[in-house]
Image: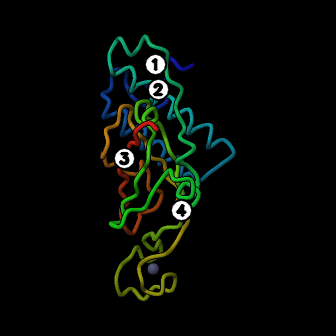
Amino acid sequence: MQNLDSCYALLGLRRGASQEEARSAFHRRVEQLYTDGAGPDTAARLQALAEAYSRLEVASMGPDAAVSPSPAPRWLWRLSGHLSSALACGGVRLLSDGTVELRLEEDEALTGGVAMLSFDADIVCRRCTGTPGAGCERCAGSGRERERVSFWISIPARVANGTVLHPSIAPLELARPIDFVVRISAPA
Ligand SMILES: [Zn+2]
């Protein structure tokens, strides 16, 4: 169990930093992990970051929340993995406007959590950085290339139906931004 001081330290924050600062620090650190490239300890480091972030988030809700049992970071495995498997199990749905619907159970919406999705997406060509007419061999002048990308989506606790979330990291510039919209399903 991490105490609050170590949570701040892990995220490189001074004690008492705002929730907004914690949020952007969390995103920066996760992004850095991806920039560094995946290693054997990447999953553990991601987990530690998410734990620290979620502890600070709970602490920011006030003393009542702080004394309640610390929530373990909730990994929404149902909504994680390759997009095709998340689609197959109904955890996500592609809408006609290109938005991805995250279908949360009521308890998942209450606790929030972290989902990781990967899929093959168009990214901006890394050689010509998408400059039109550059005569780039890598992308045949299209300015785009296709690559498997992975990112985390941080779902805040008590998220409201219809909330639009953005991927917490984009390891490479996506050719087109992807929005995720929360859809909370009523209990059966
Ligand atoms: Zn190119």
Q: Amino acid at mark 1?
A: Asp
Q: Residues within 10 Å of mark 1 (few under 14, many from 20)?
A: some
Q: Amino acid at mark 3?
A: Val
Q: Nearer the viewer, mark 2 or mark 4?
A: 4
Q: Earlier in the sequence, mark 3 or mark 1?
A: 1
Q: Earlier in the sequence, mark 2 or mark 4?
A: 2
Residues at circles 1 and 2 in contact by the CB criterion of under 8 Å: yes
> Which mark is drawn over residue 5?
1
> Does dot 2 land on a helix, a strand or a loop?
helix
Q: Which residue is mark 4?
A: 119
Q: Nearer the viewer, residue 144 or 162?
A: 162
> Does dot 1 land on a helix, a strand or a loop?
helix
- Residue at (40, 54) in percent of width and height: 101
Q: Which residue is mark 2?
A: 9
Q: Which residue is mark 3?
A: 182
- Location of the N terminus by quadrant is top right
Q: What x and y, as percent, mark residue 155?
A: 41, 40
In the image, residue 167 above or below residue 9: below
